[in-house]
């Protein structure tokens, strides 16, 4: 998505060699008309996939998933994060999965109440970034626990120099990223064509 790449170049801040911050339009302040365009781009990519629900993870996935859900006309559900990575075995009303956070270098637990994903649902997973694919894999794990199907994975910014794509493709999922960053460093941000 050309406008997204331009926006990343204009407003993205590279932290070290591996973290990209886009606080000015997605991760802190939200540029609503622009995120709406991103939602539409996901709709164009996945409109034939039979999507019945969109699943993301709090917090930064929410604006994008919300925007996409408007175009699909389906509900959007977000998994909640809990810092204690250990599953609550007594919580029978929840689907839970453990996710290792690349940015925080620690594991956490994600949870979705069972009534919000149903057997037979076709779930589009959406997130802001793909790094090593742990968040996407955790969300897909929850989809399977529910007896639902992953219709695809939509990512706003994929860091192509980390192994997230390999992780989710090995699991057999279709993944579409609106921008793929191949490197960030002295030569600026380099995108995959
Ligand atoms: P993964 O699970 O693929 O390793 O990492 C993806 C998750 O970590 C996303 O939900 C995102 O919130 C966060 N993340 C990973 N890398 C970055 C990054 O460079 N910038 C920002 N803002 N978030 C990131």
Image (cartoon, grey):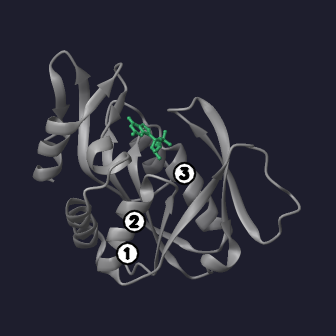
* Quadrant containing the C terminus in the rendered view: top left
What residue appears at the point 89 percent right and 62 percent down from the top-left corner?
90
Q: Is residue 86 visible?
A: yes
- Mark 2 highlights which residue? 65
Q: Residues within 10 Å of mark 1 (few under 14, many from 20)?
A: many
Q: Nearer the viewer, residue 67 or 114?
A: 67
* Separation of residues labelled 2 and 1 (CA atoms): 6 Å
The reply to whether the residue tagged 3 has its Cβ within 8 angstroms of ligand 1 is yes
Q: Which residue sits at x=53%, y=80%?
A: 121
Tell which tag, 3 or 1, sits nearer the viewer.
1
Check the image and name the residue furthest to the top.
Answer: 186
Residue identifier under label 3: 137
Q: Is residue 127 above or below residue 160?
A: below
Q: Quadrant of residue 165?
A: top left
Q: In terms of secondary structure, where does tag 3 sit?
A: helix
Residue at position x 38%, y 45% from top? 129
Instruction: Report the label total.
Output: 3
Residue 3: mark in rendering? none
Relative to residue 123, is residue 30 drawn left or right? Answer: left
Q: Choose between 14 and 142: the one closer to the eye.
A: 14
What is the spatial separation of the Cα atoms under label 2 and label 3, in whole angstroms?
17 Å
Of 166 and 1, nearer the camera is 1
User: Which is in the foreground here, disc 2 or disc 3?
Assistant: 2
Mark 3 vs 1, N-terminal side: 1
Tell which of 63 and 88 is nearer to you.
63
* Element carrying mark 1: helix
Q: CA distance from mark 3 to mark 1?
A: 21 Å
Q: Earlier in the sequence, mark 2 or mark 3?
A: 2
Where is ligand 1, by quadrant? top left
Per the image, the residue denoted by label 1 is 69
Mark 2 in CB contact with mark 3 (< 8 angstroms): no
């Amino acid at each position: 998505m050309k406008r997204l790449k331009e926006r990343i170049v204009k407003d993205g801040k590279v932290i070290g060699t591996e973290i990209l911050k886009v606080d000015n339009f997605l991760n802190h302040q939200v540029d609503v008309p622009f995120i709406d365009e991103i939602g539409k781009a996901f709709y164009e990519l996945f409109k034939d996939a039979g999507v019945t629900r969109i699943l993301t993870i709090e917090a930064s996935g929410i604006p994008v998933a919300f925007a996409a859900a408007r175009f699909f006309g389906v509900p959007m559900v977000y998994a909640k994060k809990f810092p204690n990575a250990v599953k609550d075995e007594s919580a029978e009303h929840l689907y839970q999965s453990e996710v290792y956070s690349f940015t925080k270098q620690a594991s956490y637990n994600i949870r979705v109440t069972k009534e919000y994903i149903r057997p037979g649902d076709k779930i589009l997973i959406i997130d802001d970034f793909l790094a090593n694919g742990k968040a996407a894999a955790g969300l897909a794990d929850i989809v399977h626990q529910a007896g639902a199907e992953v219709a695809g994975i939509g990512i706003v910014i994929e860091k192509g120099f980390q192994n997230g794509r390999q992780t989710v493709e090995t699991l057999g999922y279709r993944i579409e990223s609106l921008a793929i960053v191949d490197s960030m460093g002295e030569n600026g941000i380099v995108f995959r064509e």
